[in-house]
């Protein structure tokens, strides 16, 4: 047998890992499974906006040839305007790379940035895209704590305490996946101060910045720290219901010389793959000026708002479960009382829940969180379906009391 790369040893993808494989096996045997494991709105009846559909159909012939390796000029121009409007200063369209989703953007940025043995500070809980890319680049993810008692805001003192002479960058996922938290301005400024003091790069994953609810303000990290080198990641997958389009980008900002070599390396990587998917880039100008279709999902009566309400109202009636209300996106990260219920771990809970109730959720360990028993619930099915799933969880937990 030919061995695989040793860089894959710690890579994990729990969202589509063993629990997901078990769910597929059950489905193949004719069992129905409600999949609350992945944030894929198009699988739950959400449809792309008419603005996106029209832009794609009207301009489709423009996507036949390879485009600029950094992305189509029209797309990069409107992305640049969008982020200037969010407060990022000193950027031009040449600071933007359109990629096949934020996943590719993160991979390219980390490949260009991380040297063997470099340490990258990341939140716990953390979307595994970031930790996996550190492993693949032969770097080391070092996790800082986000505090559930402080609305899941990161602890800047914990971040500062984990800086070493090998630390290269700080990943900030805001709004956060898996908690749905939106970080305070004070927290973001404190994180920027750590980066400034130790000459670190900020990697700001802000793909959910258009999916913020309840009148909460979202602050772009690069806008708050114009003197700190920063790469901001964003895209249209969730805000405009086009996950399968793989439409994301990254924006370089801060002192122009600080990230020159990294940006040059990203240019090399972009050249190697010739260009991003040109079809999806056709819709970026139309999508970024269409905020109404996104906003409609987030207000009372909108699907995301009502699905959150149905989920949280049902969960709040279950003894031994507590949670911090998400303020963005469609994720909830509740805690299950390990003293009240007989589960060895979050994975044990999730596997038994899948087998007994045919509902798939992902344990907190899949997001590098191991302090207590938590699961991530994706609130994308219709409200009545989510309410029933949470009632099933309550019945399941009642059967597993200590």
Image: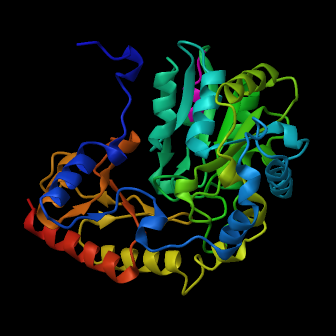
The N terminus lies in which quarter of the figure?
A: top left
Q: Is residue 358 left or right of residue 91?
A: left
State whether residue 332 is above or below residue 234: below
- Decide if residue 303 is on the left or right side of residue 292: left
Taking the magenta stretch, the answer to whether it contains residue 19 is no
Looking at the image, is 6 positioned above or below residue 293?
A: above
Front residue (pair 310, 93): 93
Residue 362 placement (x, y as % from top left): 31, 52
**Quadrant housing residue 156:** top right
Where in the figure is residue 214, as x and y percent of width and height? 61, 74
Residue 187 shows in the view: no
Residue 99 visible within the image: yes
Query: Is 296 above or below relative to 233?
Result: below
Q: Nearer the viewer, residue 389 or 33?
A: 33
Q: Is residue 285 left or right of residue 27?
A: right
Q: Which residues are magenta?
A: 159-164
- In which quadrant is the C terminus drawn? bottom left
The residue under the point 76% across, 65% down is 286
Residue 116, position as x, y percentages in the image: 54, 12
In the image, is residue 163 part of the stretch drawn in magenta?
yes
């Amino acid at each position: 047998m030919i061995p695989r790369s040793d860089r894959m040893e710690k890579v994990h993808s729990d969202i589509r890992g063993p629990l997901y494989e078990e769910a597929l096996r059950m489905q193949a045997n004719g069992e129905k499974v409600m999949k609350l494991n992945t944030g894929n709105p198009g699988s739950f009846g959400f449809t792309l906006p008419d603005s996106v559909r029209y832009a794609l159909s009207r301009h489709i012939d423009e996507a036949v040839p390879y485009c600029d390796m950094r992305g189509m000029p029209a797309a990069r121009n409107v992305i640049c305007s969008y982020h200037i409007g969010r407060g990022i200063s000193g950027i031009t369209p040449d600071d933007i790379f359109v990629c096949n989703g934020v996943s590719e953007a993160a991979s390219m940025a980390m490949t260009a940035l991380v040297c063997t043995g470099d340490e990258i500070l990341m939140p716990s809980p953390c979307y595994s895209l970031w930790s996996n890319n550190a492993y693949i680049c032969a770097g080391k993810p070092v996790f800082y704590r986000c505090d559930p008692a402080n609305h899941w805001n990161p602890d800047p003192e914990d971040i500062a305490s984990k800086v070493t002479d090998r630390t290269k960058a700080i990943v900030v996922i805001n709004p956060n996946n898996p908690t749905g938290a939106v970080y305070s301005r004070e927290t973001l400024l404190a994180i920027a101060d750590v980066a400034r003091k130790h000459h670190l790069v900020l990697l700001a994953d802000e793909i959910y910045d258009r999916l913020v609810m309840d009148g909460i303000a979202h602050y772009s990290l690069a806008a708050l720290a114009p003197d700190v080198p920063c790469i901001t990641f964003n895209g249209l997958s969730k805000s405009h219901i086009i996950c399968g389009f793989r439409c994301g980008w990254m924006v370089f900002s801060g002192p122009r010389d600080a990230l020159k070599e990294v940006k040059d390396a990203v240019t090399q990587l972009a050249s190697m793959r010739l260009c991003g998917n040109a079809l999806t880039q056709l819709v970026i100008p139309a999508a970024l000026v269409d905020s109404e279709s996104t906003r409609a999902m987030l207000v009372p009566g909108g699907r995301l708002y009502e699905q959150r309400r149905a989920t949280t109202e049902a969960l709040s009636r279950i003894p031994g479960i507590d949670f911090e209300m998400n303020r963005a996106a469609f994720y909830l990260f509740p805690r299950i009382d390990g003293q009240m219920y007989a589960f060895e771990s979050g994975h044990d809970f999730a596997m038994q829940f899948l087998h007994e109730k045919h509902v798939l959720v992902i344990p907190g360990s899949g997001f590098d969180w191991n302090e207590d028993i938590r699961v991530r619930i994706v609130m994308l099915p219709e409200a009545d379906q989510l309410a029933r799933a949470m009632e099933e969880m309550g019945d399941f937990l009642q059967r597993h009391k200590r």
